[in-house]
Image: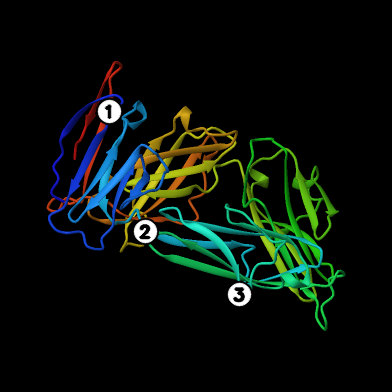
Amino acid sequence: MVTKGRKFEVMEGRPVELPCAFSSALDDEAVNWVSGGETLALDEDILNNDPKLEVRKESDRSTLVITQVEPQYSKKFTCMLLGSDITAPSVVITPDASEYTVRKGESVLLRCLASGNPKPVVFWTKKAGQLEEDVIQRTDGTLSFVADSAHQGVYICTARNKIGEKWKSIDVKVNGPNNAISGAGVKPWVRTEEGYIPVGYLDSTNISCTFDGNPPPNLEWYYNGYRVKLNDEKFMDAKEWEQREQNYTRTTLELHRMNQDVFGDYICQASNNLGTARAVIHVSGKPGPPELDVAGSVLKWSVRSRSPIIEYAVKFRLRSHDIFNGKHTVSADKKDRTGSDEYSSSVDLATFLQKGKTYEVQVEARNAMGWGSMARKFQTIEVPGDDSVPTASSSQLFIFFGPLLTIWRVL
């Protein structure tokens, strides 16, 4: 990249062009423009649907055009070649199973969760045939229908962006109205809507799961590996009940006066003569496992906690190491709270990690009850920047109240 940082001054309402030039022709290499952790454009495709943004790509340069400057454009703009913050799609289907057995007449909902940057387009197909006319496919990646024999088959979810394509499949089998299968029964299945439930000290809470199978499974609750017995001292105030819905049973464990003695892992386990299925729900007054996301050098996270978050710890290690031996603390702010028990924050890793190195990073949060769980998966990031080879240029816009809008462009 040969573009040097410089300063722009633009009247509000006027256009501005931010050039990004390279020392040689780009050929098939992609150029993306990023601002505030969001990818705005990839090559000449505007990804955030902003009508005031345009990109012109020539042989050795890319130019971001803001056709009408407004106050909301007072932020940093970064131009870079295809790098670590551009990713091919990944796909997860729920239910998370290669084979999914349903009853005839049951309402079926398949979800396809896709990630990638740029945000991938998601669509469903059916192997060796078309989707039935009564199948409803939505833009959020869900597929729904009322099960009939015609719906049996392999459903394929495909996620596609400019970088590539990824797909996964699920084999849906439809049984008779009484869940009868010729010569066989149905193994139990168990599902839960939440893997973590935040609670406050002495709060009450309900934890539940749904299950089914043929023969009808026996359902048991376990706490930290031990069978929950309602006559035990710690569960004397607890209640358990089941409710049969159209195609499944919902079981609920009602807990009161929550404290350290009953924080932990609750397992909902269903068993019949064909097998056993279980789901784990973690209940705690400490913060839950954060959800992590990386955009450029910025690490973002969200975490649930009933009590206010006090601080976060970003733990890191070089990719070749086994132990997270580095730690950077981030104080929580009131504005981190985004819901009744939801918090989010971020940090620029380039401010304390060595540029040009690849790290694996983790996050945990602390409230008054202590440090919570670490994220279920760490994130891998190559910190951009190098003393000898520039990888990006940046533009920063600062607004002054008045008719003049000043745009600064800095490395």
Dots 1, 3 in contact, CB < 8 A: no
Is residue 261 shown left or right of residue 356? right
Above or below, comparing residue 192 to residue 147 in the picture: above
Counting from the top left corner in percent of width and height, residue 62 is at: 23, 49
Is residue 156 shown left or right of residue 383? right
Residue 214: mark in rendering: none
Dots 1, 2 in contact, CB < 8 A: no
Q: CA distance from mark 1 to mark 3?
A: 52 Å
Q: CA distance from mark 1 to mark 2?
A: 52 Å
Q: Earlier in the sequence, mark 1 or mark 2?
A: 1
Residue type at the position of mark 3: Lys
Residue matched to label 3: 127
Counting from the top left corner in percent of width and height, residue 215 is at: 84, 71
Q: Earlier in the sequence, mark 1 or mark 3?
A: 1
Counting from the top left corner in percent of width and height, residue 218 is at: 82, 65
Indicate the secondary structure of the residue bearing disc 3: loop
Furthest residue toward right: 178
Few, some or many C-alpha atoms within 10 Å of disc 2 (few <14, some 14-19, many ≥20)? few
Q: Please identify, in this view, whether the residue under mark 1 or under mark 3 is nearer the observer.
A: 1
Q: Is residue 352 visible?
A: no
Looking at the rendered image, the quarter that the C terminus falls into is top left
Residue matched to label 2: 323
Residue 14: mark in rendering: 1
Dots 3, 2 in contact, CB < 8 A: no
Q: Is residue 35 visible?
A: yes
